[in-house]
């Protein structure tokens, strides 16, 4: 077993444990912070695959954008409504059985498949070409996605504030 194998298994363990905590935690803040470790673990596996650009994009977009937006939205709505946000787990036994069946099937597929292994290719112009392609073809879509996320955040704040005002009026 090489050093790369050990590092891969370490990242895989981080991803599995933190993903389990995301699903199993009753407090949504704990789930969001566990999601942070899941995203970093996936970025680590991308680095092991010599996909440094994809790893950086993973960290910038998911950790720097999406996760911060989720945490900000949860904390902001938590302050407005003054309600502790918790999740309730229902149907635990059926979900464990179905997850076990799916996991067992995936493990069987992974172990019985004859995987093709190739030497990694190092391309110097890949990041430059990807950057030019994204800026020339998909820049408007990236900006539109950012605006949609901002509108969704503002909408959730307005809904939470409206509900708080309605509950205050009922209490008076």
Image (tube, rainbow, N blue to C red):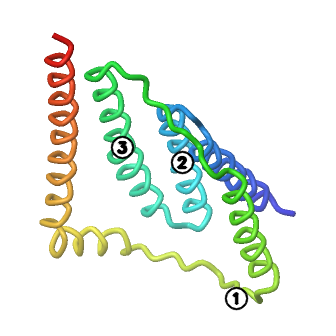
Instruction: Give the CA distance from mark 3 to mark 1.
Output: 34 Å
| First along the sequence among labels 3 and 2 | 2
- Near-viewer residue (10 or 34): 34
In the picture, the quarter occupied by the C terminus is top left
Query: Residue 116, which numbered label?
Result: 1
Q: Which residue is mark 2?
A: 40
The x and y percentages for residue 95 are: 66, 58
Q: CA distance from mark 3 to mark 2?
A: 11 Å
In this picture, is 133 found above or below 139? Answer: below
| Left or right: 26 in relation to 13 | left
Q: Earlier in the sequence, mark 1 or mark 2?
A: 2
Which residue in the rendered view is the most extreme toward the top?
172
- In the displayed structure, does residue 91 sit left or right of residue 36? right
Residue 63 x/y as whole percent? 41, 45
Q: Secondary structure at mark 3?
A: helix
| 18 lies left or right of 105 | left
State the residue at coordinates (35%, 33%).
Answer: 74
Quadrant for residue 102, please give it: bottom right
Q: Which residue is mark 3?
A: 64
Q: Residue at x 37, y 49 (%)?
A: 60
Taking the spot 42% from the left edge, 54% from the top edge, the residue there is 56
Residue at 34% over, 25% down = 78
Q: Residues within 10 Å of mark 1 (few under 14, many from 20)?
A: few
- Residue 48, placed above or below residue 69: below
Position in image of residue 89 (x %, y %): 59, 43
Q: Quadrant of residue 80?
A: top left
């Amino acid at each position: 077993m090489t050093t790369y194998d050990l590092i891969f298994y370490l990242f895989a363990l981080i991803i599995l444990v933190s993903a389990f905590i995301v699903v199993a935690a009753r407090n949504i803040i704990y789930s969001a912070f566990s999601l942070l470790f899941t995203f970093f673990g996936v970025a680590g596996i991308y680095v092991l695959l010599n996909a440094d650009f994809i790893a950086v994009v993973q960290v910038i977009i998911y950790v720097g954008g999406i996760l911060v937006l989720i945490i900000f939205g949860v904390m902001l709505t938590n302050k407005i409504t003054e309600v502790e946000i918790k999740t309730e787990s229902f149907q635990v036994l059926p979900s464990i059985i179905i997850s076990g069946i799916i996991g067992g099937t995936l493990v069987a597929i992974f172990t019985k498949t004859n995987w093709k292994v190739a030497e990694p290719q190092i391309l110097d112009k890949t990041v430059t070409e990807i950057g030019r392609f994204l800026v020339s073809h998909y820049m408007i879509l990236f900006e539109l996605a950012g605006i949609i996320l901002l509108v969704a955040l503002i909408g959730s704040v307005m809904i939470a504030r409206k509900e708080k005002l309605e509950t205050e009026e009922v209490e008076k």
